[in-house]
Amino acid sequence: MSDAILVTGGCGYIGSHVVRQLSESGRRVVVYDNLSTGFREALLHGEDVIVAELSDQAALDGAFHEYGFKTVLHFAASIVAPESVSLPLKYYGNNTRNTLGLLEACVRHGVQRFIFSSTAAVYGFPDGGVASEESRLAPINPYGTSKLMSEWMLRDTAFAYGMKYVALRYFNVAGADPLARIGQRTPEATHLIKVACQAALGMRESTAIYGTDYPTPDGTGIRDYIHIEDLASAHLSALGYLEQGGESTAMNVGYGQGSSVREVLQVVREISGVDFRMVEADRRPGDPASLVARAEKIRSLTGWSPRYDSLRQIVADAWRWESRLAGR
């Protein structure tokens, strides 16, 4: 049995899929989560769970003393970009300050490898709507800024103390476990595909299209949607890269192909068989017309190879999960 791996936020949407894949690959995983947005039921393989706040240094130290972690995967964070504009201190506290506290614990206990859950929001409005790891870092909301500040702290801490890290910058994660065992549970989630599935299930009156006058082929925003299973496997690939002596770096995780809001909603209609109501609305402040990844780096450095890079697959798995969640 390999050394135990600490996963913060492991009961959440993304964290739980990574935990499942780690456990199924033979790793021993310990989850640290305050269960504010996560669910114990999302852990499928009896992983140990420490229910505590990330700001609780005594609880963190106790966990490190008990398990002797040398590898940490850090997901615990607040993630709703529009909310971060109205509640910035929540994001600088929960994301930036708590990452600082976690890094202090990692230094005290000699952690060797750290994988950080970052975001494409660190790029803001990339030139041409396409972001590579060399694109200018210019977040446009406190969420993106809190994550970029965390990346910088991680970079400097790793350099000073000899720790190696990978910061994974996610694009638009969606979908669910193909067997519908776990998926996104947060009822007030704002992700387009989840919202559209809920509309198709009659749980919402409609789905809003925010902005129909963008300079895109159909006037709606374009995003790089990535299946949660592929996003999760990217973390295992990044961990393998570090274990084989890879250098610290940041990597985009996306497919390098975009889909518009209208295209996504049409696929949800086709998969669900429901012609749910769509409402056109004004653009949301801070939404770029297009945000698509350049993601060659993670493929070349880690050998990561996506298996679910189809919008229909993403929607089909999301629809299966949402139907099950709704008891259909």
Image (spheres, grey):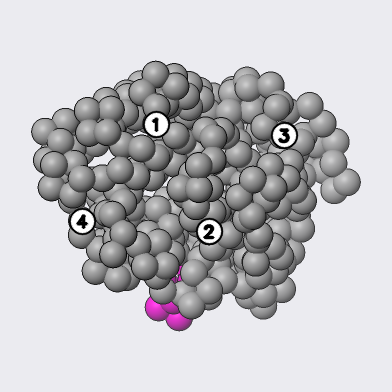
Q: Position of residue 277 (x, y in %)?
A: 65, 61
Q: Is disc 3 in contact with disc 4, using a CB cutoff of under 8 Å?
A: no
Quadrant in which residue 92 is drawn: top left
Of pointers 3 and 4, the one earlier in the residue sequence: 4
Q: Position of residue 237 (x, y in %)?
A: 54, 54
Q: Which residues are magenta?
A: 321-328
Distance of label 4 from label 2 (alpha carbons): 22 Å
Q: Tell me the residue that label 3 is attached to.
A: 131
Of pointers 4 and 2, the one earlier in the residue sequence: 4
Q: Residue at x 50, y 38 (%)?
A: 166
Distance of label 2 from label 1 (alpha carbons): 22 Å
| Secondary-structure class at tag 1 | loop
| Secondary-structure class at tag 2 | helix
Q: Amino acid at mark 4?
A: Val
Q: Amino acid at mark 3?
A: Ala
Of pointers 2 and 1, the one earlier in the residue sequence: 1
Quadrant in which residue 23 is drawn: bottom left
Distance of label 3 from label 4 (alpha carbons): 36 Å
Depth check, mark 3 against mark 1: the one in front is 1
Q: Amino acid at mark 1?
A: Met
Distance of label 1 from label 4 (alpha carbons): 25 Å
The answer to whether residue 79 is above or below residue 227 is above
Q: Tell me the residue that label 1 is attached to.
A: 163
The answer to whether residue 87 is above or below residue 256 is above
Judged by its main secondary structure, the magenta piece is helix
Of pointers 1 and 4, the one earlier in the residue sequence: 4
Q: Amino acid at mark 2?
A: Ser
Would you say 298 lies left or right of 110 here? right
Of pointers 2 and 3, the one earlier in the residue sequence: 3
Q: Tell me the residue that label 2 is attached to.
A: 233
Residue 49's disc is 4
